Amino acid sequence: MNPLTLRYLIDFAYLVAIVLFILALRWLSSPATARRGVLAGEIGAALAVLATLANPEIVAYKWILVALLVGAIIGIPLGLVPMTAVPQRTALSHAFGALSAALIGIAEYYVRAPHITKFGMTEISMEVIIGGLSFTGSLIAAGKLQELLPQRPITYRGQNVVSLSVLGAAVILALILIFHPGDTFLFPWMVAVSLFFGVLLVTPIGGADMPTVISLLNSYVGLSAALLGFVLNNKVLIVAGALDGSSGFILSVIMCRAMNRSFTNVMFGAFGQVQASAVTAAESRTVRSATAEDAATLLGAANTVIIAPGYGMAVAQAQHKVRELFDVLTKRGVDVKFAIHPVAGRMPGHMNVLLAEADIPYDKLLDMDAANPEFPQADVALVIGANDVTNPAARTEPGSPIYGMPILDVDKARTVMVIKRSLSPGFAGIDNPLYYLDKTLMLFGDAKTFVGDIVRELTGGHTA
Amino acid sequence: MPAHFISSVYVFVLAGFIGFEVIKHVSRLLHTPLMALTNALDAVVVVAAIIIAGRAQTPLSMILGLVAVAASFSNMVGGFLITDRMLRMFKLSRQKKP
């Protein structure tokens, strides 16, 4: 084939891939069409890969096939992880995405250096710095989510000054390289400093902020892919990167709004390290606790029950027991719904996936805006493993660290039941006045066991 | 400034705009699958990795390129796989077995 014709055909295949990518995201607007979206994405991606393999510049076919095979061998198990491991898997895939973008940028640099234009060097250094910091940042996030690293924020005095100086050093190295392209020995240093900055960026951030951090890293990975598209003049990379970047950005904004916090506060605020003063105030107040039998009686007699799940439900692996409870109550004619706070869990949409996996129909999953008007009509609000997102102090106590954060109005239900291991404050270390309300019953115990006990009471000793 | 820069900026701005408009309408239920899917789509950097490894200009560029091929292709395969697994789980009440 005429090389020019082939070139056009490849470009045309890329264009079709881009259109399919956009359609893929568009079809995610409803669970009913979403799987069609995945198929569109798959066809688009396959088309882009096949078109690239037809590129006559490629000589090392054998090795590429080996690398593709290795990628598939790593990728398939990562696609089959249990739903509870999805947050860490996502962080790991961000790390892989950032790694490949950074490596390609580095390879391109060494192919061109030292005969590299100022403009080209600017693009490459931006790409490599963002790719590098997203790589290590995502690895740290994955380590925290997998609990290989402590989930509590790790902080020290002057941390932000140190972190920003490291970023500054990376930028200065990039500037030197732009104006003195001959100083190639500085390039590995720039890479190393960016990698180090990624570690510093994510280490101080606590587990409760992971939904925002993971979204923000998602956005950076997209940005690094788009920048790589600028470096290599490849439009399909620019489009995919821009789509990924805007998706991550929108999710970060949603997460920040759901916590009433700014990006800067999430990144540099080290949320939830010391709230000792708020915790001590709890001692004098009394709580009402109840048994599984009491809870079963109340739930069985209710017309409407709204369940508010949180990360604790995922930790206790209680979602399948919750499904049994849902089935038993539904069979008795009780209207059971789920109220899902945007930051419940460790990544955007985490609770929806866990509940869908447990076979809860998605029309029973309400987001915060849909759920809140329903609480005043609910007989029982059952809180399972959620804490801060149900804390009425966010509405009433201007001094509280979470004041102003939108919450699930569980306290407006006739009765509130909270399944919790103990009265210890939640992840953010903030006391929850919900537990001391007259209408609140505390159900102390492991979420999975306790929900199982309630189900047994409701079915008269037989498990559902 | 290379000649293609301006057209790249055009593409980036327009794609970002389309991204905002399309993703704004993604169901709130599906934010986890959204992140998994955009991850898989972003893995199209494998295209650039294949080119840089395939040209084999220097041993270093080839090795880095091949690592990038494996890393991004694993995202592509794993990303589509897990997105589809997640989406298969979302069912309506009436679609459920009795």
Image: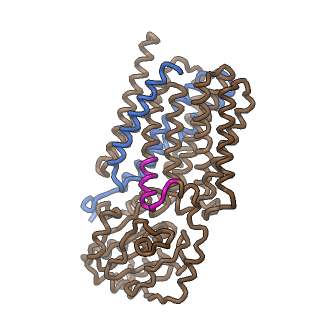
Identify which residue is drawn at 57% across, 82% down: A280
Q: Is residue A32 left or right of residue B32?
A: left
| A257 is within the stretch colored magenta | yes
Question: Where's residue A123, x and y in %?
Answer: 57, 30
Question: Where's residue A30, x and y in %?
Answer: 30, 50
Q: Drawn colour of chain A?
A: brown
The C terminus of chain B: image quadrant: bottom left
Residue A464 seen in render: no
Identify which residue is drawn at 64% across, 54% down: A160
The image shows residue B1, relative to residue A357, as above or below, that is above
Q: Residue A443, located in which quarter of the rendered image?
A: bottom left
Q: Drawn colour of chain B?
A: blue
The image shows residue A25, relative to residue A91, as above or below, that is above
Identify which residue is drawn at 56% across, 21% down: A58
Q: Nearer the viewer, residue B12 or B29?
A: B12
Q: Is residue A282 left or right of residue A243?
A: right
Residue A100 seen in render: yes
Prevailing secondary structure class for the magenta stretch in the rendered image: helix
Q: Nearer the viewer, residue A263 or A360?
A: A263
Q: Is residue A158 left or right of residue A247?
A: right
Q: Is residue A299 left or right of residue A450?
A: left
- Which residues are the magenta region? A248-263
